[in-house]
Image (spheres, rainbow, N blue to C red):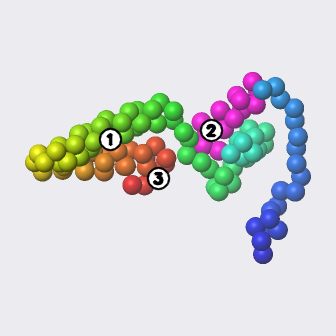
Amino acid sequence: MAGSNKRQRGRMLSIRLTDAEAEQLEAAANRAGLSFGGYARQALLNAPPPRASRRPPIERAELARLLAHVGKLGSNINQLAKYGNAGRLVDDSQLAAAAAAIIELRAEIMAALGREP
């Protein structure tokens, strides 16, 4: 049986919102980690949303912090590659530190996405 044939919700509710109201509701749904429909259903009916509609909330400040770490890490790896291409020896501890930073950054990104590392 196809997924669309299993749906139990057949009625649709339509409301008119200003752009500001729609943005406010969309932001609230994102903060709650829900789809727009799941958030509206929860707010209107005080009903728990279906588990499948849960999304990890996106924390912009956390993503900006992680993006800064990616930039630093990329710069460090670029410097190591430059040294290696110039025939200079790259210290194993520098490579180990870069690898550890990549592992830590990956774990932080997975946590920000609400996933297990």
Element under disc 2 = helix
Q: Is residue 62 visible?
A: no
Using residue 22 as the reference point, say whether residue 59 is left or right of it.
left
Disc 1 packing (10 Å; few <14; some 14–19; many ≥20): some
- Frontmost of labels 1 and 3 is 1
Q: Are marks 1 and 2 in contact (CB under 8 Å)?
A: no
Tell me the kind of residue under disc 3. Answer: Arg
Q: Which of 53 and 62 is in front in this view?
A: 62
Tell me the kind of residue under disc 1. Answer: Gly
Element under disc 1 = helix
Of all residues shown, which one is farthest toward the front?
A: 86
Residue marked by disc 3: 115
Q: Which of 41 and 36 is in front in this view?
A: 36
x, y percentage for residue 66?
Answer: 40, 37
Residue marked by disc 2: 30
**Res 34 quadrant in image:** top right
Compute the Cα span from label 1 to label 3: 24 Å
Compute the Cα span from label 3 to label 2: 16 Å
For marks 1 and 2 on the same chain, the one whose residue lies earlier in the sequence: 2
Using residue 61 as the reference point, say whether residue 1 is left or right of it.
right
The residue segment tinted magenta is 20-34
Residue marked by disc 1: 74
Q: Which residue is drawn at 62% across and 50% down?
A: 54
Where does the C terminus fall, quadrant-wise?
bottom left
For marks 3 and 2 on the same chain, the one whose residue lies earlier in the sequence: 2
